[in-house]
Structure formats: C-alpha cells, structure tokens
Amino acid sequence: MQAAADKSLRVMIAGGGTGGHVVPALAIGRRLRDDHNADVVFVGTARGIETKLIPEAGFRLELVRSGQLKNVSLMTRLRTAMDVPLGVLHCMSLIRAFKPQVVVGVGGYASGPAMLAAVLLRVPTLVYEPNAVPGLTNRVLGKRVRSAAVNFAQTTQYFNHAEVTGVPVRPEIFEIAPKTSGAPRLLVTAGSNGALVFNETMPKIVAQLLVDVPDLTIVHQSGPRKLDETRTAFSESGANPARWSVEAFLTDMPAQYAAADLVLARSGSTVAELCAAGRPSLLVPFAAAADDHQRKNAEVLVAAGAAEMLLQKDVTPQSLRSALVGLLTDAPRRDAMAQNARALAKPGALDRIAEMVLKLARP
C-alpha cells in the first residue's frame, strides 16, 4: 500500500459489517474526498457489506481479520481473540504505509484493531458512535481516542472531547414534509437483512390489519434471504395483494418515508433517519444487539414521545396488531410523535464530523 503524494489530507476510515456502519462511513469519506480533496482509504473485513459498497463508491478497501467477541460461541470468541493481535499488527503496517493524519473508527469488526493501532502509533483518532451506549470497542478505547462524534448527549460521558453531532443522514430525508393527506401507509423496514420477527409475524396479521384500517397499504422490506418465503406467506394470508408489497431491498428510502404514516422498524441507525424524516414509529429492538444498544436507542425516542417500543420477547400476532392499529387509527397521536421525532433530528451532522476530522489533522 502506498501513501498518496498529491493530496495533503489523508484519512483512514475503519469499520463496517452492516449498513449501519458502512453507510455513514461512506458519507464521511465522500464529504472529505469531494469537499476537502482528501485521500481516503477504508479498512474492513471480508465478511461485511463494505466489500461491495466501498469499491463501488470508488474508494480503496484494505481487509483485516477480526470478528465478534459478544453474543457468540466460545469458539468464535477464541478465534477472534487470536485474530485481534494480528489485526492490530496489520493495521499498524497499513498506517505506517499510508501515513494518515487522522484515523476514524465507525464501529464494526475492523474498527477495534485499526483504532488500537492508531492509538499505539499516536495518530489522531476520531470515533463515530451513533448509539446511546457505545459497543465494547468504543467503551474500551473511549478515553484513549482523541475525539468522538456522537448522536446522543448521554453518550458523551464515555469519551474525551466528545461532540453531539448527530448521524450523517441524506439531506433529502430532512426535506420530507409532514404527511397530511392520502391513504394510510405502513412501512416495515429492518436494515439490509430484514428482521425475522417481522417476516414471520406480519403475514399472520396482514389480512385483519387491512380490515381494521380501511385503505391501508403496506410496504414490507424482508431482506434478500427471506424474500420468497415472506411473499408466499403474505399471499397465503388472503390479504388483498393490491394493498401490500414485499421487497428484498428498498432503495428509495426518502420516497418511502415520505409516503409512510407509520414505520415499524428496528432501532439501530434507522432511528436517526426516522427523526430526520419526522416519522412516528413502532420500534422493536433487535434483542441480540451487542450491549442491548438498540433497546437503549429506542428508549431515547420513547422518552421524547417520538416512538413506541415493543420488546421482541413480547411480540405476538395479537400484541403487534394491537400496537399497529392503535397508532394507525390515531392521527393526532401520530402527528405529535412526528413533531417530537423531528425535534430530535440533528441537521448538519456530516459537516460537523468533517470539521472535527480537519481540526484533528491540523498541526
């Protein structure tokens, strides 16, 4: 790997695995490249979606070995424990070759080795932490990294020199207007892989839900692995096929949010988009998320009156239908939730994060 000689700013961005890590990482990388002429290299692992999205965006991607330590088998933890020192040494080699002025960690498997390598080599570091409570890596390194960009005020306690920037969200999502007319729409979304609990439960209630809420239409994102199975279950429910759609991916999220009266979702990085769009939501946190961070994210929105939460252990066809009908048939309640969600939004997050990187890069 060779350091670039024609650009004064060099930044390494480490992390990945899921869209919640890779999408904001790419947003940060694009802003630094396009607006500040930075040479940006990404560090990820072979197991994440960064292997597809980052090269497609025109960036270099270096791969290191790393894995999970929490909520996995003993064998996986042992394998990861052996990979970590090798990953740190590999990242130290990458840093020495590329000579970045700043290393940014966005969470995910590769973030830990790269950030630890940067700390050991005394390269300025910036952590991006979108969750209310940081994951293991960011908690361990929190007081050792130079700076942190966080989404929630309560997260600042885990870091030195933290700033509440918010989460990089596409500008067009902030421009979505309140929905005041048209047939009611329920949007069901759960990230790039979908959610098994939604795929299994929604087909059991869709027919009655369409009776309970006249003119309701439903857009359900299943993830690619469960697309055929979920579509078949919807078809076999007897629900009017003109009033529902099941898709593997939803590539037009601004349009989907704009059309939605209510969103049924997980509570990872999606919560920032819900706030930016000003959309009320019923959140079902992913129960196996590291450090239960999705529940803690959802609790912030619930406390602000921007969402309701249904824990996965409490999800049954009856409880989900009752919660959805209650919200879909109460427009004043949804309007209040939408306003409260919008009040939590943080426009300009990308500009603020880029400025933090530039500040760290200055001598």
Image (tube, rainbow, N blue to C red):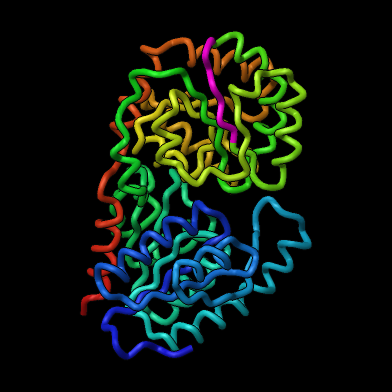
Q: Residue at x 44, y 83 (%)?
A: 95
Q: Nearer the viewer, residue 77 or 223?
A: 223
Residue 314 seen by the camera: no
Q: Is residue 112 magenta?
A: no
Residue 9 seen by the camera: yes
From which residue to which does the magenta span run?
214-220
* Position of residue 224 in the picture relative to residue 255 (left or right): right
* Position of residue 5 in the picture relative to residue 191 (left or right): left
Where is residue 98? Give x, y as percent: 42, 85
Where is residue 242? Give x, y as percent: 60, 23
* Position of residue 337 in the picture relative to residue 189 (left or right): left
Q: Which quadrant of the figure has residue 307?
A: top left
Q: Residue at x 53, y 43 (%)?
A: 250
Q: Residue at x 29, y 43 (%)?
A: 346
Q: Which quadrant of the figure has residue 335?
A: top left
Where is residue 189? Give x, y as percent: 55, 37
283 over 80 or under it: above or below: above
Q: How many marks?
A: 0
Q: Residue at x 57, y 59 (%)?
A: 17
250 over 349 or under it: above or below: above
* Position of residue 73 in the picture relative to residue 138 (left or right): right
Where is residue 197? Give x, y as percent: 68, 33
126 over 97 or under it: above or below: above
The C terminus lies in quadrant: bottom left
